Image (spheres, rainbow, N blue to C red):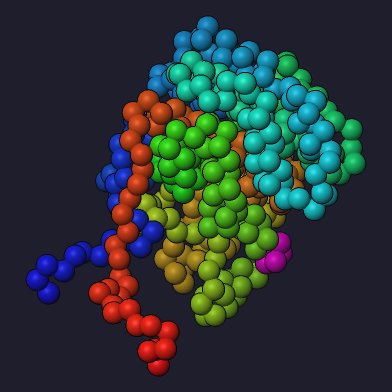
Amino acid sequence: MSGEKKKVGDGLQDVVATSSAICRIDIEDGRGVLEYRGYDIHDLAQNSNFEEVAYLLLFGELPRKKELELFKEELKERRDLPPQIIGLLTHLPPFTHPMVVLRTAISYLGSMDKYIHFKSHERSIEKAKSLIAKFPTIVAYHHRIRTGQNLIHPDFELGHAANFLYMLHGEVPSETEEKSLDLDLILHADHEFNASTFAARTAASTLADIYACVVAATGTLMGPLHGGASQRVMEMLREVAVPWRAESYVKEKLERGERIMGFGHRVYRQVMDPRTIELRVLAKKLAEEKEPKWVEISEAIAEAVYKYKGLLPNVDFYSASIYANLGIPDDLFINMFALSRISGWVSHIIEQYENNRLIRPRAQYIGADSREYKSLNGRK
């Protein structure tokens, strides 16, 4: 029909919302590409650490040795929580989901910041470092409180990943455990305009404070189609229980028209998510030291899904077995995502502040129009 408008893709698929210099995802020569500030994710995964990646996302360049040492020290200095936040964690209802706890604590931290509405680059960077540093402490403290255990305070001799596992379990992690979490944090740090990051940028475009923007992101991350997917994967692994049941489980689910979590991606449609490539190797290595069955079940499910559906696993799929082998409770899986993605969120928020235009898209109207209003008595 002449003049008919092209329908916008559902979920804004393939719609370019704005520009960014932080992250690039693409498909080149039949492979998935993910770059942070121009650096390939495989190079970062194999050579870097989370603190260095967080610095890269925030400042746009890899740090020199002294800069990285200073950045690590600054994060360590900000790990402690104010007594008021610890009190909040103690008094929240015991049934409160850990992600609700996290976003509530973020709001409380904002209420204690007398510079909450200051958005200069320097102030924003300081707030960003504080949030990156405090996220692990909030999650670990709350878990210890809800399970009736004494708090394990930060160990300033340990790096970011190792310190979190220490605060959570009360034991210094092995080198494999530390490296596993560190790599997982690198791989989840950013992914362009995913749902939670876009929510954070939308909030930032209104010039809301950084805490409000992060709360918007955490609320969005909590959905089972975003950050909650890895928990659903773990539930599936427990349900399958043994590798030999995987094919029949997958076949029956697909015949019922049910979704199998951890497969398919909006961007990497016909290629492997590059993060999955790294996570699969990591999951297998960790399984050699811990429990092998989760990876064995995962591999069997992946083979069956590809056989019957032609779908490849995404970043959530192997994260589940990694978290399980790190002793992370299922309902903390979304929080683990947040511990990493906070570095990407704050980087995007700052980028939005510094080149801002209110994000206000239009909707393609598909309802009735030009209808005549009739009085109540005249309606049939």
Compared to residue 348, the image places residue 378 above or below, namely below
Q: Position of residue 263 (x, y in %)?
A: 49, 59
Between residues 211 and 55, which one lies in front from this camera angle? Answer: 211
Compared to residue 361, the image places residue 119 above or below, namely above
Q: Position of residue 91 (x, y in %)?
A: 84, 41
Q: Residue at x 61, y 68 (%)?
A: 246
Compared to residue 125, the image places residue 186 above or below, namely below
- Which corner quadrant of the image does residue 129 belong to? top right
Q: Residue at x 80, y 25 (%)?
A: 83
Q: Is residue 196 left or right of residue 360?
A: right
Magenta-span inclusion, residue 241: yes
Q: Is residue 275 left or right of residue 4?
A: right
Between residues 71 and 250, which one lies in front from this camera angle? Answer: 71
Position of the N terminus by quadrant: bottom left
Q: Position of residue 196 (x, y in %)?
A: 50, 45
- Which corner quadrant of the image does residue 152 belong to? top right
Q: Residue at x 71, y 62 (%)?
A: 238
Q: Main secondary structure of the magenta part?
A: helix
Q: Position of residue 75 (x, y in %)?
A: 62, 19
